[in-house]
Image (tube, coloured by chain):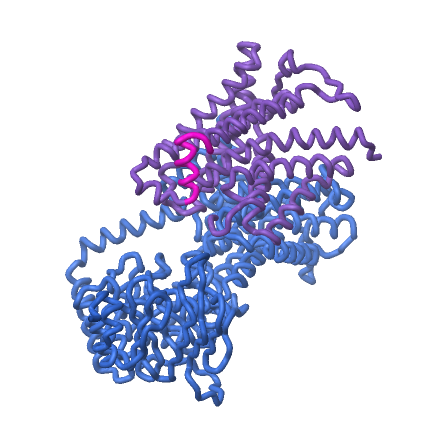
């Protein structure tokens, strides 16, 4: 039966999932918005971030080191991937870009499988966020509350980077019109490389933050990727605020539907996406004509 | 004699397929292929034929084919195991139909968008099918257990019954179905529908503008691909005697894409080759070399390398190599002969063009109503883009048979005006009448079918097709209307099509360059082809947006001659900046300035009009 505490805890769960999805999707969406590339390896980035973090944790035992390793490793991976492969695909059709990132995603998954095996890996939450917290009307795992905070800070940093720095200004201008930015004498290719790295890092960071909640396997990125797609379609492809709004909506849909019947949660998510496509094809916060 | 040779040649792939399918079970086991693997390859190859039509030909990259594979498979398996359906064939057909219906419904949603949106939406939809199978529908599908006990087909030959279980009989059964699948797919490819699908991939905007209902064709190929997937899904259950739930998994779609790309896109046989390579590598790397799970890593790397360097996969690579070798061989052998042949046929073509008195292209042969007023009449036409008023209250009429010129300085709103007349953009206010019919708010495809079309200011061609194929796309729209389901008919056999294509090519003087890919044509040739695309739809009113732009003086003179010849018996409106040419061609001229009509009159009147001079030069009025 649906009771108030149950509902509230599911709503909180939705917020946790939503925050993670928001961060992952904003990475996906700024890459697409700036570079015009849909990165199908984004789910794999999430997974690699998780494994890099777990690896660092096993050596250092430090949660902070795990977070740093997860984020930095994927940042470097993103930059290398952009330099070696993606940059040669800017002038090729969308379909080629989709195919090559899809293939790279599989390569990353299989490399990780080769190194760590198919069994799941996990990592405990840090000592300061272990156990449960009483919220007065209900008790809730402390780490999940911490995740909302950690992701919130990461999103704020991303927001600051996009809206308060010179680089961010170029990126946002590039989303509107990258040809124009190029003709203003700005080195668009370098900006593209940085954006790809940062976008990938967002997924990788989310990947390691998620490990104490759910153990990680090499295949975890696949379902994450699909959910991130739905989020950006709902929020509007290329829109950073749209990714955050879409992520929160998707998180609540998944969580609240599974309170009633878990088997329908994905179906419900898809139904909402279809509804958005019918009523507002450019997404809730997307602008018409960009995609 | 020639026809029969052509026919033999066109049936060569079918013959080769039969021979290959017959020989495979005797040859392939020697290199480590077991029959069961071959059976799997056939099922995956059949699955891939539909996908190749969808992605290789029509350019629609779907990541959701598993949805239809699973739908077909589970429908057939459910009917055969739970409902006690006695006929395996009926089960397969029902599964295929179910998958096609699912494809139709999914297509309605997914095809609302293109490119990356399409890819993302198909992924999401396929995931929903997966989840539906796994829990809400698990009563029917067995959930994570799948459906065991799928029977194998029994062939009643009257005197004996052939039970196609495992091994060779099953191989025969699958090979026959695969062959049928290939034959049908090859017919689709050479049918008008197949040609139009390629045109949609190359340039959807132009495919719609020459009068094809591209949305309907995309939906059609989506349904066809789903039907192939559904049949293959049903066969998988029969082959294994068990319908596995992972048929619905994302991995199924992903493998299909990888196998098709590895084998070669737009080849139809690509998926078969890709699947063979895939399963062979999996088996040899996994067990033979003891590499375990690394086989998928190897395939992933191969796939990435192919996408990067060899877009057309293994078959395409061999085809290119073969073409390269044979062309370098030919070059060494007969350079002189080739040159001679080229020049003589060129001479013939040009001689023909000059002597042929019938230079006027045919116009649409449709029942003409009694309407006798102006062929085109625009009333109070305005277009507003945000704060910018591009066209402001234009009243405009053109009489049948007239050749009207439109001039005006840059930014006068000429192109916007044309776009409204052809219904590419809809006016903010006002109305457009064509042959007495109100066409305001029509779509560009409908308007073209009525006999009004445009050649574009910036070339909108089907770049990777030849000039002849380009013209054929236009002519097909005129011969068949905006949509027709003739996907099993040979396009070359449509009465009058060949003549119309040849006639248009003669008219735009591209006969001797007809089989050259557009990307290899010179600029002036491309411009003429651009006009030819509009012309081949046999319009009664033809709009030309800057047909002379960017041409050399010689090309201009030739094009002016061409425009004169096609204007016989046809109404035309031409926008251009070349005043001399326009004054020479046009019966009357309309001058646009700042979105309004400045003045209208005969070329002589316009030449001496002070307002016109001021518009162009500024401030010459005393």
Q: Please tell me whether residue B297 belongs to the stretch shown in magenta.
A: no
Instruction: Please tell me which residue is depicted at 71% across the width and 20% down the height of the picture.
Output: A141
Q: Where's the N terminus of chain B, which quadrant?
A: bottom left
Residue B590 visible in the current orientation: yes
Q: Please tell me whether residue A175 belongs to the stretch shown in magenta.
A: yes
**Coordinates of residue A75 in the picture (x, y in percent):** 45, 25
Q: Is residue A41 left or right of residue B177?
A: left
Q: Residue furthest front?
A: B622
Q: Residue furthest top?
A: A60
Q: Quadrant of residue B102?
A: bottom right
Residue A109 visible in the current orientation: no
The magenta stretch spans which residues? Answer: A163-176
**Coordinates of residue B373 in the picture (x, y in percent):** 44, 86
Q: Colour of chain A?
A: purple
Q: Is residue B56 above or below residue B573?
A: above
Q: Quadrant of residue B618?
A: bottom left
**Coordinates of residue A81 in the picture (x, y in percent):** 41, 31
Q: Which chain is blue?
A: B
Q: Where's the C terminus of chain B, which quadrant?
A: bottom left
Q: Nearer the viewer, residue B581 or B324?
A: B581
């Amino acid at each position: 039966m649906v009771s108030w505490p149950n509902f509230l805890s599911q709503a909180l769960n939705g917020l946790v999932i939503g925050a993670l999805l928001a961060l992952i999707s904003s990475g996906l969406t700024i890459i697409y918005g700036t570079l015009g590339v849909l990165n199908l390896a984004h789910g794999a980035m999430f997974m690699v971030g998780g494994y890099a973090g777990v690896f660092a944790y096993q050596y250092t035992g430090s949660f902070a080191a795990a977070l740093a390793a997860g984020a930095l490793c994927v940042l470097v991976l993103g930059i290398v991937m952009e330099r070696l492969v993606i940059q040669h695909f800017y002038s090729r059709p969308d379909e080629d870009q989709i195919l090559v990132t899809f293939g790279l995603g599989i390569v990353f998954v299989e490399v990780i499988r080769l190194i760590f095996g198919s069994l799941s890996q996990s990592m405990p939450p840090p000592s300061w966020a272990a156990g449960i917290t009483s919220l007065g009307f209900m008790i809730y795992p402390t780490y999940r509350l911490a995740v909302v905070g950690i992701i919130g800070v990461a999103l704020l940093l991303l927001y600051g980077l996009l809206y308060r720095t010179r680089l961010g200004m170029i990126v946002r201008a590039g989303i509107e019109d990258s040809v124009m930015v190029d003709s203003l004498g700005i080195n668009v290719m370098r900006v593209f490389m940085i954006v790809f790295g940062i976008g990938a890092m967002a997924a990788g960071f989310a990947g390691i933050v998620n490990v104490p909640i759910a153990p990680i396997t090499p295949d975890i990125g696949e379902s994450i990727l699909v959910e991130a797609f739905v989020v950006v379609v709902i929020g509007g492809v290329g829109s950073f605020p749209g990714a955050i709004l879409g992520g929160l909506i998707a998180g609540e849909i998944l969580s609240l539907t599974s309170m009633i019947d878990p088997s329908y949660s994905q179906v419900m998510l898809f139904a909402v996406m279809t509804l958005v496509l019918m009523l507002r094809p450019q997404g809730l916060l997307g602008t018409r004509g960009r995609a | 004699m020639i026809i029969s040779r052509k026919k033999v040649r066109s049936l060569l792939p079918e013959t080769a397929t039969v021979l290959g399918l017959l020989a495979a079970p005797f040859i392939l086991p020697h290199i480590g292929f077991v029959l069961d693997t071959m059976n799997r390859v056939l099922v995956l190859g059949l699955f891939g034929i539909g996908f190749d039509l969808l992605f290789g030909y029509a350019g629609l990259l779907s990541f959701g084919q598993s949805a239809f594979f699973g739908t077909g498979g589970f429908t057939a398996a459910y009917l055969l195991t739970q409902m006690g359906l006695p006929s395996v064939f009926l089960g397969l057909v029902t599964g295929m139909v179910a998958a096609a219906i699912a494809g139709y419904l999914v297509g309605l949603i997914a095809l609302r968008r293109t490119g990356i949106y399409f890819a993302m939406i198909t992924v999401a939809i396929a995931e929903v099918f997966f989840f539906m199978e796994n829990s809400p529908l698990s009563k029917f599908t067995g959930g994570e257990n799948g459906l065991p006990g799928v029977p194998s087909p029994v062939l009643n030959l009257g005197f004996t019954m052939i039970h196609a279980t495992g091994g060779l009989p099953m191989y025969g059964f699958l090979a026959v179905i695969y062959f049928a699948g290939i034959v049908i797919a090859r017919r689709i490819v050479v049918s008008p529908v197949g040609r139009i699908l390629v045109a949609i991939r190359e340039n959807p905007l132009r495919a719609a503008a020459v009068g094809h209902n591209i949305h309907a064709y995309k939906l059609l190929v989506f349904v066809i691909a789903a039907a192939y997937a559904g049949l293959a899904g049903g066969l998988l259950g029969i082959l294994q005697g068990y319908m596995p739930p992972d048929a619905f998994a994302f991995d199924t779609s992903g493998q299909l894409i990888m196998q098709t790309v590895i084998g070669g896109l737009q080849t139809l046989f690509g998926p078969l080759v890709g699947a063979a390579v895939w399963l062979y590598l999996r088996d040899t790397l996994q067990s033979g070399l003891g590499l375990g799970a690394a086989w998928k890593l190897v395939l992933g790397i191969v796939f990435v390398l192919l996408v990067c360097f060899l877009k057309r996969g293994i078959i395409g690579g061999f085809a290119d190599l073969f073409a390269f070798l044979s062309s370098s061989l030919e070059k060494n052998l007969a350079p002189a002969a080739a040159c001679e042949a080229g020049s003589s046929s060129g001479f013939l073509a040009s001689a023909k063009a000059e002597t042929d008195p019938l230079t006027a292209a045919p116009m649409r042969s449709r029942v003409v109503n009694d309407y006798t007023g102006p062929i085109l009449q625009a009333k109070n036409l305005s277009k507003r883009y945000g704060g910018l008023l591009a066209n402001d209250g234009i009243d405009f009429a053109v009489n049948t048979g007239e050749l009207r010129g439109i001039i005006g300085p840059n930014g006068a709103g000429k192109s916007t005006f044309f776009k409204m007349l052809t219904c590419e953009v809809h006016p903010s206010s006002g109305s457009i009448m064509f042959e007495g019919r109100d066409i305001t708010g029509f779509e560009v495809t409908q308007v073209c079918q009525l006999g009004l079309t445009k050649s574009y200011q910036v070339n909108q061609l089907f770049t990777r097709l030849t000039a002849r194929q380009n013209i054929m796309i236009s002519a097909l729209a005129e011969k068949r209307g905006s949509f027709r389901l003739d996907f099993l008919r040979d396009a070359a056999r449509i009465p009058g099509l060949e003549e119309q294509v040849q006639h248009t090519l003669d008219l735009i003087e591209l006969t001797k360059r007809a089989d050259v890919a557009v990307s290899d044509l010179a600029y002036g040739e491309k411009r003429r082809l651009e006009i030819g695309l509009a012309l081949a739809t046999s319009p009664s009113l033809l709009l030309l947006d800057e047909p002379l732009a960017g041409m050399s003086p010689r090309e201009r003179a030739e094009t002016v001659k061409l425009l004169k010849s096609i204007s016989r018996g046809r109404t035309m409106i031409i926008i251009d900046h070349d005043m001399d040419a326009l004054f020479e061609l046009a019966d009357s001229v309309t001058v646009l300035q700042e979105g309004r009509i400045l003045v209208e009159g005969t070329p002589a009147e316009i030449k001496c009009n002070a307002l016109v001079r001021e518009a162009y030069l500024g401030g010459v009025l005393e």
